Image (spheres, grey):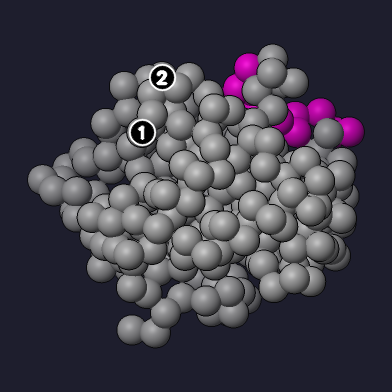
Amino acid sequence: TKPVTITSLQAMRDRGEKITMLTAYDASFASLMDMCGVEMLLIGDSLGMVCQGHDSTLPVTIEDVAYHTASVARGARTAFVMSDMPFGSYATREDAYRNAVKLVQAGAKMVKIEGGAWLVDTVRFLSERAIPVMAHLGLTPQFVHQFGGYKVQGKSTEAAEQMIKDARALQEAGAAQLLLEAIPASLGKAVTEAVSIPTIGIGAGPDCSGQVLVMHDFIDVFPGKKARFVKNFMQGQDSIEGAVRAYIREVKDGTFPAPEHCF
Ligand code: KIV
Ligand code: NA
């Protein structure tokens, strides 16, 4: 199998084939997911919660993400490995570039940053310097204190219109992909139709170009509260491999996410 690239992912989006993504933090799980055919592996700053036991993603450092990125990259063969820029690592475009380089050197082929149009400059700066960028819109967990909790975003007409504008501006600036989290399914569809780059959704409805779940959620080992968009794919399976394959199947054929996982 050929390695998954930014171009092959764009081609999947263009022909309407759903993209599958999972988070991964170590080489063994990365290798299993890769073998099953998951196209994208994200070293999420969710590692602060699922690996480190913090109650938010804010304590995660660039060194933490780089460490897990190197582990995942060693386990992956064909999957596209990408990493989150953690809180505080991309306040300026120069900071963003210096820190993104650490993740790319650890094995990431794209970096993800949280925010809307204010990131346009940063997205352009990184893209022009050879670092593909995914922009994360909607419920951006690094904004937990600004939002006053983990709340569904984009519910008002104004917020929805702003998100569509932000998405277009980020694409214009060179963003390779968008991540849409916890927004109404109708808005997930509208943003996806407003851009020509892939959109990967988590709690953003079935019409995104692809879906992502946090590993510890989809195999039901995360002890915390479960979000509406989470599905336990161990149900009906007797191995984690079975759960990964069920996830891929259900994303590809459109059975996941079902209405009960959407806003
Ligand atoms: O950190 C993470 O795992 C993420 C995904 C939920 C998209 O950002
Ligand atoms: Na994240």
Beta carbon at label 1 within 8 Å of ligand 1:
no
Crowd class of label 1 (few under 14; some 14 to 19; many from 20; radius 10 Å):
few
The structure residue drawn at horizontal position 25% and vertical position 68%, both measured from the top left corner, is 35
Crowd class of label 2 (few under 14; some 14 to 19; many from 20; radius 10 Å):
few
Camera-side mark, 2 or 1: 1
**Residue 57 position by quadrant:** top right
In the image, which disc is placed on residue 51? 1
Q: Position of residue 88 (x, y in %)?
A: 68, 36
The residue to which callout 2 is attached is 225
Q: Position of residue 208 (x, y in %)?
A: 60, 55
Left or right position of 170 against 79: right
Indicate whether 179 appears above or below 183: below
The structure residue drawn at horizontal position 19% and vertical position 48%, both measured from the top left corner, is 240
**At label 2, which amino acid type do we have?**
Lys
Quadrant (top left, top right, bottom left, bottom right) of the C terminus: top right
Q: Position of residue 196 (x, y in %)?
A: 73, 68
The segment highlighted magenta reads: 149-158
Pointer 2 and pointer 1: residues touching (CB < 8 Å)? no
Quadrant (top left, top right, bottom left, bottom right) of the N terminus: bottom left
**Residue 153 position by quadrant:** top right
Q: Position of residue 49 (x, y in %)?
A: 43, 28
